[in-house]
Each structure stands twice: as C-alpha cells, then as structure tokens.
Image: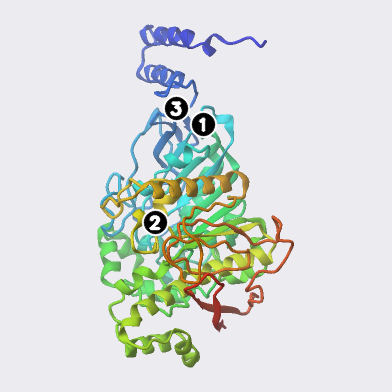
Amino acid sequence: MPQRSSLDRPMDRMATLRKLVTGKASRTLFVISAISLLAACCNPAGRVDSMGVIKTESGLVQGKRGDVHAYLGIPYAAAPVGEYRWRPPRPAPSWSGIRDAHAFGPDCMQPSEYPEMRGAGMSEDCLSVNVWSPATRPDEKLPVMVWIYGGSYIYGSGSLPSYDGAALARRGVVVVNLNYRMGLFGFMAHPELSAESPHGSSGNYALLDQIAALEWVQRNIGAFGGDPRKVTVFGQSAGAHAISALIASPLADGLFQQAILQSVVGVMRPMPTLKEAEEYGNSFGSSIKDMRRLPAADIVKLLMNDPPPQTLLTRTKVLNIISDGYIVRESDFKPFGGGQLSHIRILAGTVSNEGGGSSRSNSLVKTTLQWRDYLNHNFPGMEVRANQVFGVENDSQVPQALTDLYSDTQFLFSTREVLTAANNARAPAYRYVFSRYRNDGSAAPIHGDELQFTFDNLTAPRRGRLQPFDSTDQKVAGMMADAWVRFAKTGNPGEVTYHHGQCTKAVRNGTWISVTHHTWEMDMTRADLILFETTTGRSGIRGRQQRGSDFVLNPDTISLEVMRYRRSCRAPRHLLRRRFP
C-alpha cells in the first residue's frame, strides 16, 4: 500500500493549520493561505477535496463551497472602456492574493428588461465568466458545457437565475457561462473602426468576446476539474446564432467539439455586409473619438432612440453578426454547404409554437389587407405563391398566420437547414422538439419557454415574475437537463419522451408523436414531449436520406423552404421555396 503523506490525513492537516495560524510567520497572506487550506480540507457537504482555492492564469480565486462549487465573476478579459471601446478584448490583468469569487461581476450595458439579474450593476467592465463544478479534484477531466445567452444581442447576462449552472453541474459536468458585449458595444461597425483595425474590419466584437472566453476555458478549465478537450457550447436564439457563426469562424477552430442550438435564428441566409453595417454605424456619429467619450448609458440610449430598421423576414437586421471578412468571412450557408459542419456534433431544435408571441408584438399587421401587403413585401417576386400558402380569409385569422410565418421563416427554417447541412456532411446530429404546456395550461410554449427546463431551474424568476409549475414540469425539466448533459458526456442525447394520451387524427388532450428521422416539422397541439432523432444515417437509420436533402446548398445559392404546421399527426406540406442570390 502506498505511503500516505501526513497532510493526507484530516487531523494532521488540522494540526498543521493550527501551527501555521499561531506560529511566528503570521503575515496576512500566510494566514489567508492557511485559511484556504482549511477550506480545502472539508467542504460543507463533508467531502474531502482540493477545490477550495483555484489557480487561474490571472491569479487565485476562491468561490462558494457545496456539493457544487461556484466561482463567479472571474474576468476573462480586460475592461473594454475608454480607448478600448469597440476594440478586440485584451487579456485580463493579473491580481495578487486570493480573489473573492462569491458574487457575480457586473452585467454588460443594456436596457432595463430583467430585474432579476444578479450582477454588480451594469458596466462596460463586464467581461467575466461564471463556473459551476462538482469536481473534488482538478484532475477529474469532466465534460464542460459553455452557455451563450440570447436576447436579440441587446439583453442578457450570465447572472440571470434561469441560467444558473448548479443543477446541470450536479449531473457530472463543469458548467460555464459568460458575459459578452451587446447592442452598439458589441456589434457596431464604423468606417473609422475598420480603418484602425489591422484586419480592415469592425463589428462582431461580441463574437471576439465569446472566442476570448472559450480560449480562457481552454487554458483554465482544467484547474476546475474540466476537460478542455470535451467542450460543448450551447445557446438559445441569438446565442445559438452566435454559435453557428463560431462554428464557421476559423478564429474559433478547436475551441469546442459539440454544439446545442436551441431555437436558432437568423442562420443559413445572407448576412449584412461590412459596408452596410458601417453605414448604419456612421449614422450614430462620424467621429469614433467623440463616441468613445460618451458615457456608456448614452450609448444604450442611442440604440433605443434609433433602433435598426426592419428587414425582410428572410434576412437579418444590420446590427447583428456581419460578414466582416475576418471573424466571419462569408455568410454561414456557404461554409456549411461546403461541409464545415463535419467536425461538430450537433443537437438542434425548437419549441412547438416559436412565433406565438409575434402577433402580440406586431401591432402594424391586423387586417387581411395589411397581411397581404406584409406578405408581398417579404416575398418580392413570389407574391402570388406566398398568398396561396399563407393566405387568410378574414381578420381573425391574421394573428395565427403571423405566428406561423414568423415560426417558419425565423426558427424552423434555420433549424432544418443547419441539420440538413450536418446530415449532408455526415456529421452526428440530433433534432428535438419541446412542447410542454407549462403547469398544464392552455397555451403551447413560445420562444424562450424552454429555458428554465434546460437548466432545471423552474423556480427561477423570469422578467421579474415567478411562473407556476407542476410535477409534470419537474419531470420534463429533469429529463431535458439529463439529455443535455448526456449529449455533453457522450455526444448522444438518447431518445427521451414524456407523454400522456395518444396521437389521433383529431389531436386533443395530451398527445405525443413518434416519428422517423425524416419527418421534420410537425404540430403537437398538446404534447409534453422531448424527442430526439438522428439525422446521420446512424443508430439504425441505414443511410436513408432525410426529407429536404435536395435543398440547394452551395457557395452561390441557398433555397428557403417555407413550411407551415399541419394540425395532424402526419408530416407537413412543403409549400414555398425561395432562392437567395
């Protein structure tokens, strides 16, 4: 039997600690080190571990102890303030002694939307990560999950209670989330900024922040018990959009191996160009020197007073990820169509009524005449076919038609095309549909309703309010979190379903639908369902081609197939196709 060091025995460690604290060498840092040794002996759960104080590249950090250790507000980059506003992130400065990591760092600048944010106020000095780890030793090499939040690239923070990583970490992974610059701070391009850049580009600073955070993970996560060679990035909405850009960017190559895209929006379509983004940025002021002098709160007000103009539903807004020629060298459908997804395992999906909130927010389209004009505007040259597909007979049908159109163009198309590209590249990929009616209510889940289920955080407030839930919600949340962690660990989420009732032609009560891998978009009117389907011909699929594999995906064109849910248990109709030049 190997000899044990005296410090391997808790009583000997305590005796050594007593000598350290009461001895002549009582300088402050020495005492702090002794206290840290006590913290490393036993945590509140009674486990012996060595995770009390963690050494990062910038210095020592000490976080909250428990069955899951939480290390909050760790800087991964220096403050992008003053002359460094609208510049790439710089390395975080070092510190001496032990940094307290018990509290979240500041939230990035944004309009007030989420009163439940737990950061230390709002500031441009916000580039920090939060780490939750169940490890008892640094050498455990647990899978790592890195969350990138959504929020239209305007709102969001790693401090939001919905994104707390403790529940996921208890399942045996290290969870990281991060803050990144948003709004004009994160996405404004400008001719003067491009001129001062050695790469001749500007904008996409949020992507550079995310890359810097992922590089920090590669260099530091091993000290928290994580494996830098087994990183899964996951994000929702704009966060999923950012992940798709990271997959395509050569600057992020090798920083992660797997990706979960929840309600991915804005992908597989032309991006705004650098020139278009520069023109928009120039509208806020011609002098970057003057704009760098403005208080951060004034920059937020600039965007709120002059939001980016609306675009066609088949394109993205100009204050967004752009094709800048450096970070993002071309619109994502080109590299994805060329097989760039072949090296990434993908899990992607949607909620069953993604566009359900759109009719409430769109106050300009209420009548059949307004609806017809709206369709004609969004599908120039295809007006007749668009009105055949999405036509309405009276004003009462407009809200649902708007919901369907928004779901199809923004989320279902994006998800379908990413998975089609993965399938064509023979990359392991899975699709899910989330359609739990929370608290057994009357409304299908809309965009964002799955987030608290993802993190198994049903008790977290959202936009300042607590949402009711029942025992079924708790089961579905547990299963969803289990599946996400299983994917992070093995690359396969497994087949997970929770259901009650049966699938019939007249869909009513609780239903679920069991489908093959090539039945794609469907309506589940009352399903409590998480369903995974392989898209690669593996797991017994035997190489059959999925529906939609004839999509045009090449460097020159991309087709947009607009689909509409059918109120049945069958596969949907393929309705409308559009080509982008």
Q: Amino acid at mark 3?
A: Val
Q: Residue 121 at x, y = what percent?
A: 27, 47
Residue 225 lies, with reference to residue 361, above or below; the image says above
Q: Amino acid at mark 2?
A: Arg
- Side of 15 where 295 appears, left or right: left
Label 2 Cα crowd, 10 Å radius (few <14 / some 14-19 / many 20+): many
Residue 345 lies, with reference to residue 190, above or below; the image says above
- Side of 469 where 330 appears, left or right: right
Q: CA distance from mark 2 to mark 3?
A: 29 Å
Residue 373 occupies which quadrant of the picture? bottom left
**Pointer 1 residue:** 135
Q: Earlier in the sequence, mark 1 or mark 3?
A: 3
**At 52% from the left edge and 12% from the top edge, which residue is drawn?**
7
Residue 300 lies, with reference to residue 460, above or below; the image says below
**Pointer 3 residue:** 53
Q: Earlier in the sequence, mark 2 or mark 3?
A: 3
Q: Are marks 2 and 1 in contact (CB under 8 Å)?
A: no
Label 1 Cα crowd, 10 Å radius (few <14 / some 14-19 / many 20+): many
